[in-house]
Amino acid sequence: MTEAQTATRPTASDMKGVIPYIAFAGRANEAADFYAKAFGATDFGRMPNPDNPGHLIHAQVGINGGSLMMTDHGCEDGTDPAPLNRVHMQLIVEDGRKWWDRAIAAGCSVVMPYERQFWGDDWGLLEDPFGVQWAILQPGQGRGE
């Protein structure tokens, strides 16, 4: 986001529930930009670190009705934290193929292909360039959608 662009303020509903907060080792700006391209994220604002140019103290984006917070704090030495290999972000959407294709075009890699699963939903798992895994899930028929 350039200085000329303005962020959208989060609403009260954007600030509910569990909000993941991820440290990006100096790449939080890049991650926020990537999530806009890959997942249609809305930029809720970025707080630069005045003591470390190019790094962020805090950033927040909205994705599919939820929020994700980011920081470079805690990674000042540039060391990337351990990968999030015990967690993934789950996006439940009505148009899963569209979300999947946009994320792939933006630069995500396939962990598990997007396809109909034995439980009846269309689901696949991606990994973004920052090591965060994202599942795209489109509920199957007869599941109250």
Image (cartoon, helix red, strand yellow):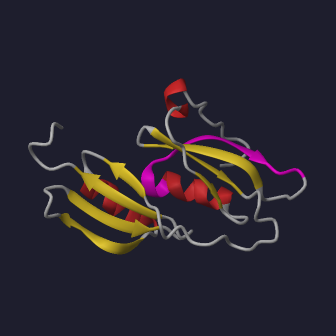
Observer-nearest residue: 113 or 20?
20
Give x and y (percent) for residue 110. Answer: 36, 74
In the image, residue 115 lies at what x, y percent? Answer: 19, 66
The percent position of residue 66, horizontal first and vertical second, equals: 46, 40
In the shown orientation, is residue 44 left or right of residue 64?
right
Q: Is residue 7 left or right of residue 65?
A: right
Task: Reply above or below: 63 against 8.
Answer: below
Residue drawn at x 83%, y 51% is 49
Left or right, residue 20 beside residue 104: right
Q: Please identify the quadrant where the C terminus is shown.
A: top left
Magenta segment: does it hold 98? no
Q: Which stretch appears magenta?
A: 37-50
Q: Nearer the viewer, residue 118 or 94?
A: 118
In the picture, residue 94 is in which quadrant? top left
In the rendered structure, does residue 38 fall within the stretch colored magenta?
Answer: yes
Residue 108 position, x and y percent, is 44, 69
Taking the image as shown, residue 51 lies to the left or right of residue 17, namely right
Front-most of residues 48 and 118:
118
Residue at (49, 67) in percent of width and height = 128
Question: Residue at image x 76%, y 57%?
Answer: 73
Toward the top, the furthest residue is 12
**Residue lying furthest front in this view?**
86
